[in-house]
Amino acid sequence: MGHHQPPPPRPPHTPPRGARPYPDPSQRQTEPVRRRPGGFYDDQPPGSGEYEHYDTGGYAGEPREVPEPAQEHPTTAVPPRAGSLPKMPKKITVTRVAAMRSRQLTGQAVGAFQRATKADGADKSGLTSLTYAVMLNYASDAAMAIALANTLFFAATSGESKGKVALYLLITIAPFALVAPVIGPALDKIQRGRRLAMCVSSAGQALMAVVMALHFDDWLLYPAALGMMVLSKSFTVLKSAVTPRVLPPEITLSKTNARLTVFGLVAAGAFGALASGFNALWGSQGALWFTVLICVAAAVQSMRIPSWVEVTEGEVPASLSAHPERRVKKQRQPMGRHIVVSLWGNGSVRVLTGFLMMFSAFAVKAQTEGSGQSPFNQLLLLGVIGAAAGAGGFLGNALGSRLHFGKPDQVILACVGACLGMSIIATVAAGLATAAIVALVGATASALAKISLDAVIQEDLPEESRASAFGRSETVLQMAWCFGGAVGLLLPPTYWIGFLVLSILLAVGFTQTFMVRRGTSLVPGLGGDRPLRPEPTSESPIPSEAGDSRWRPGS
């Protein structure tokens, strides 16, 4: 029999497949289990049972899965967390990265805009809804101006364009002449339906824009433009009457109006740029159809204003006269001397802004027409003055919303004096550069003076008369703007002549403002022969800020 060879001995401590070898005994760890003298163990730790446990390093159980080291540049996409960057595409290209970054920046901008419109409790009081409606109204005015600018001004020679702009100025002034005697008293009688009135105003603007788009080359263009301007100014007056009803308790009326103006200017710039694109692609009619869409959106947004703005019981209309007529059935609240001073000062500054609007356009056109420059170059030069005015408006509203003016009368006098001084400088050193500086100072002064006027109305008048006072003051300021525009249109397009006449007008306005502040006047009946702050004429108590029915969160 042959000898059977035994198998080779198995090495001791051979681990099974997939397991690691036993660790060295010195490295083994046990749980702290103590034995008592009787041979029993102390209470075991949870889950330990009756045995002592050793860390076998994965030998006796399932194979330990060792995680792979993290890669420095992973190839698989990680699910994004909430608020993190958007998901990266599988294939990264420059175009996709740019598109992703653009979406991210757009989302951040929209979020910042929404937070700004809802700040200080504006979303609860209803101010946010009014802000959107006001922005759309500014946008429709800007879009219509872009649509009609080429037809009325830049496409014609100086003589032709002056006649067309005279017609356009008539279209602009007529609304104020109608708004003053009609809309103001109508607001005093309207106790309900102001939201509906704003909606109808915007819907009417949309209808007028449709008529202008369909009859752009015939005589119906100008009556439709007139109707649209009337409705737009009516919306502005209605807005002034609604604003006190959606005032959050955290901010004042002056800051609220400054905020509305800033948002309106931003909307006018953005939608004006879009309207310019439509005008370049499809002509003026394309810009008008774009205006129709804006007006429809404004009509819808007007009805989203909270219903508590309709609660106007106990309102007392305000009167510019120091002694309202006794034969009027409804009692009226006279305005005090502080308010009249503010109106004269603001009106003087508005004369300057209206003058620059018309005069600078023809001065630039006359200056560049002889040199053979294109209408586009004329528009660029005019844009220098427009940009200065826009910057001044933003600056004035930003300063006014952050600063507290203890004496609004002095602020308004300083604004009129600054405008007068710059106008005199522009008369001596005439030119486009000085005209731009006048526009910057004038727009800043206009914003600061308007904020001061709002503060005076809020302080001097009782709650039940503020809405009417805001509507009437807005009408007065718009009429002053149109007067300045008419003066700028009628004067020859020579810088020093125009600013000389403007300096004279501002000097008269400054003198009248100063005299009214001292208790006298150049104009009988509209001067300072009245108390600084008249007593409220209503017999009902003034509602408190906390208990006013105009502001109902959650209703």
Image (cartoon, rainbow, N blue to C red):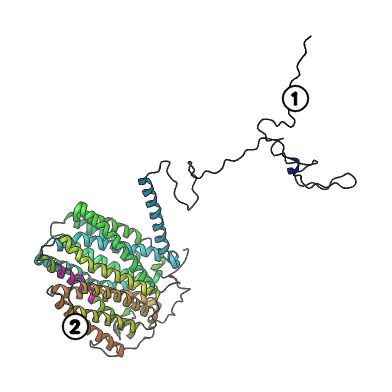
The range drawn in magenta is 352-365
Residue 137 in percent (x, y) is at 30, 63
Farthest-out residue, right: 38
Residue 269 in percent (x, y) is at 29, 62
The first of marks 2 and 1 along the sequence is: 1
Residue 340 visible? The answer is no
Relative placement, left or right, of 549 versus 234 is right
Q: Quadrant of the N terminus?
A: top right
| C-alpha gap between disc 2 and disc 1 | 121 Å
Q: Name the quadrant containing residue 364.
A: bottom left
| Amino acid of disc 2 | Ile
| Amino acid of disc 1 | Pro
Decide: is 90 above or below 516.
above
Residue 20 visible? The answer is yes
Residue 9, numbered label? 1
Decide: is 137 above or below 99.
below
In this view, the residue in front, 98 or 136, is: 98
In this view, the residue in front, 115 or 7, is: 7
Residue 504, numbered label? 2
Name the residue located 45 percent from the left edge and 65 percent from the top edge: 124
Disc 2 element: helix
Report the predominant secondary structure element of the magenta stretch: helix
Disc 1 element: loop
Decide: is 393 above or below 5.
below
Residue 177 in percent (x, y) is at 21, 73
